[in-house]
Image (tube, coloured by chain):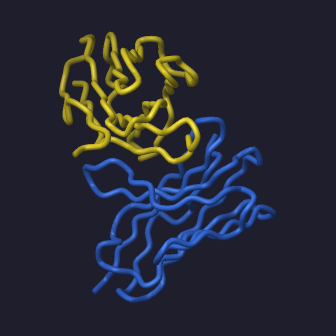
Chain colours: A blue, B yellow
Amino acid sequence: DQQVKQNSPSLSVQEGRISILNCDYTNSMFDYFLWYKKYPAEGPTFLISISSIKDKNEDGRFTVFLNKSAKHLSLHIVPSQPGDSAVYFCAASENYKLSFGAGTTVTVRA
Amino acid sequence: DTAVSQTPKYLVTQMGNDKSIKCEQNLGHDTMYWYKQDSKKFLKIMFSYNNKELIINETVPNRFSPKSPDKAHLNLHINSLELGDSAVYFCASSSRTTTYEQYFGPGTRLTVT
């Protein structure tokens, strides 16, 4: 029973353009939403988070948008850089526990 | 300085054996976790300890037993290993006030033959 879903397994984007990653969730009790980035053979790295009471959070090139009524969040990366090529996991938090999506593999083309 | 470290990084063993994976964090966090990433790449919480006390215990076979000797360490012991236990196991830690912001170790790839 996946409570967090990333329906796009992969995304290819040209360097300098915007990357938009999407995530849907079903549990209304989630209080924080996060994005993690993962390189091969490494652990996930925390990227950015957003509280359920906000609709936008920005950190440098990364912006996360939350639409609670649609139970949807997205991550925008502007501009995309080659080092952004990785797997991005959407996650949601409830009482110490993180529930993860299946991940989206982003490839940034030169 | 490695924030969250795990040993070993790779573990190949036969069915029926008992093995342990160790995790240490030097971030001063008081909450630690074990996650399993299966063949479909889903990351799923297994256990969580806060100040050496078990606070999350998901539906995991009781062949898996976590042990936290102190706040900086959380080890995972697995008895009678089965083929289906093959996966990547990640340790993570967080502070009590920001439990959603978890820091992960590099993972231990367990292969059971």
User: Residue B19: image x %, image y %?
Assistant: 25, 16
Seen in the image, is A59 located left or right of residue A55? left
In the rendered structure, the answer to whether residue A85 lies left or right of residue B62 reads left
**At x 44% / y 68%, what residue is drawn?**
A10
**Within the image, what quadrant is residue B58 found in?**
top right
Q: Seen in the image, is A76 located left or right of residue A70?
A: left
Of all residues, the one furthest to the front in this rendering is: B28
Number of numbered discs on residues: 0
**In the displayed structure image, the side of residue A29 where residue B84 appears, left or right:** left
Q: Position of residue B20 (x, y in %)?
A: 27, 18
Q: Nearer the viewer, residue A1 or B93?
A: B93
Looking at the image, is A100 positioned above or below residue A7?
Answer: above
Q: Is B63 rendered above or below residue B42?
A: above
Classify residue B55 by image quadrant: top right
Q: Residue at x 52, y 17 (%)?
A: B53
Q: Is residue B113 above or below residue A48?
A: above
Residue at x 20%, y 36% (from the top left corner):
B9
